[in-house]
């Protein structure tokens, strides 16, 4: 019996860069919400056209410590930009990311929950269908974000990362974090922003740990610029990515998308491989068939 796979969208930050938009720290992709919203909206449209069925607003850096008093309006505008281009009924996720650098778990603050709660509350007020806590390399902060998000109405997913070299968490550590997150009430656990060629062991460990309780997913990065999976490698890279994603699905993943360096072409290739639409943020909306 095959699984119905939900195809997620792809990155905004690296896609903005690919289109010539400068996104420096500390705002990164959030700067586009303020300065080049038309480009950001077109990226969202391209992921819709590619066949993604769950889309994430560009709220990754919409936080007070990064954006100051602009953080709230950035979150509002990011959600509205995405809503304006989505077909009716398409799930819209709000992104909640680490407060500091997502590749520097050593910078994670001692008490991050209040700041994550502030963004979660704003996203819920904007009517998001899903709260996606994503790209967390620090298990403690990830669980703080989950606590801040759970119980506000929308389902909560958690995506953990081992970083762009795959060395910030072991698969076992990620699985232990996933168990704790599921105990707190998340409805899906994913691995993201790990090189696609290194993602399979993380999916396997997640599925073994919690696959009988929640959905499992993966949205990987394209690896180094010379890795051939993304970063402008087009159709050939997209097909190589799909071949790796097939391994993740075989290992139990039912949520699959793209992260840094992948493109709308990658998402289109994923949709071509798994064309049956499962456009719901509910974990159990994609049963095996």
Image (cartoon, rainbow, N blue to C red):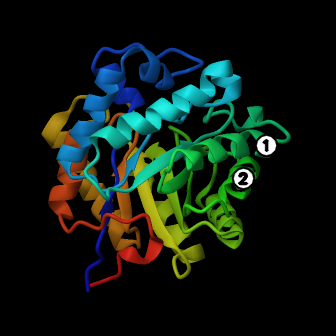
Residue 282 location (% of width, % of height): 45, 70
Image quadrant holding the N terminus, namely bottom left
Q: Residue at x 28, y 64 (%)?
A: 246
From mark 1 to mark 2, how far is it between C-alphas? 7 Å
**Do tag 1 and tag 2 residues touch (Cβ < 8 Å)?**
yes
Numbered tag placed on residue 148 in the rendering? 2
**Count of marks overlaid on the render:** 2
Q: Assign a secondary structure to mark 2.
A: helix
Left or right of residue 51: residue 197: right
Q: Residue at x 55, y 63 (%)?
A: 155
Numbered tag placed on residue 114 in the rendering? 1
Residue 271 location (% of width, % of height): 20, 57
Vertically, is 13 above or below 127?
Answer: above
Numbered tag placed on residue 266 in the rendering? none
Please state which of residues 21 and 250 is positioned toward the viewer in this rendering: 21
Q: Assign a secondary structure to mark 1.
A: helix
Residue 68 location (% of width, % of height): 68, 20
């Amino acid at each position: 019996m095959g699984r119905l796979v939900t195809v997620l969208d792809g990155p905004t930050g690296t896609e903005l860069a690919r289109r010539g938009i400068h996104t420096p720290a500390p705002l990164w992709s959030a700067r586009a919400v303020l300065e080049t919203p038309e480009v950001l909206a077109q990226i969202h449209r391209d992921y819709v056209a590619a066949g993604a069925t769950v889309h994430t607003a560009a709220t990754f850096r919409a936080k007070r410590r990064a954006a100051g008093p602009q953080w709230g309006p950035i979150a509002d505008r990011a959600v509205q930009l995405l809503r304006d281009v989505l077909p009716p009924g398409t799930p819209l996720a709000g992104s909640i990311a680490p407060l500091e650098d997502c590749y520097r778990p050593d910078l994670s603050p001692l008490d991050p929950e209040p700041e994550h709660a502030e963004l979660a509350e704003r996203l819920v007020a904007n009517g998001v269908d899903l709260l996606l806590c994503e790209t967390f390399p620090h298990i403690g902060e990830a669980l703080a974000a989950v606590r801040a998000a759970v119980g506000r109405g929308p389902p909560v997913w958690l995506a953990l990362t081992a970083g762009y070299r795959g060395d910030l968490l072991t698969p076992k550590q990620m699985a232990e974090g996933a168990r704790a997150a599921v105990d707190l009430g998340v409805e899906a656990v994913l691995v993201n922003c790990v090189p696609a060629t290194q993602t399979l062991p993380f999916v396997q460990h997640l599925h073994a740990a919690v696959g009988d309780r929640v959905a499992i997913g993966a949205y990987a990065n394209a690896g180094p610029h010379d890795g051939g999976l993304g970063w402008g490698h087009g159709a050939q890279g997209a097909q190589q990515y799909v071949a790796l994603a097939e391994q993740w699905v075989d290992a139990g993943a039912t949520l699959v998308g793209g992260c840094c360096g992948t493109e709308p072409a990658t998402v289109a290739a994923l949709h071509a491989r798994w064309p049956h639409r499962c456009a719901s943020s509910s974990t159990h909306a994609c049963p095996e068939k």
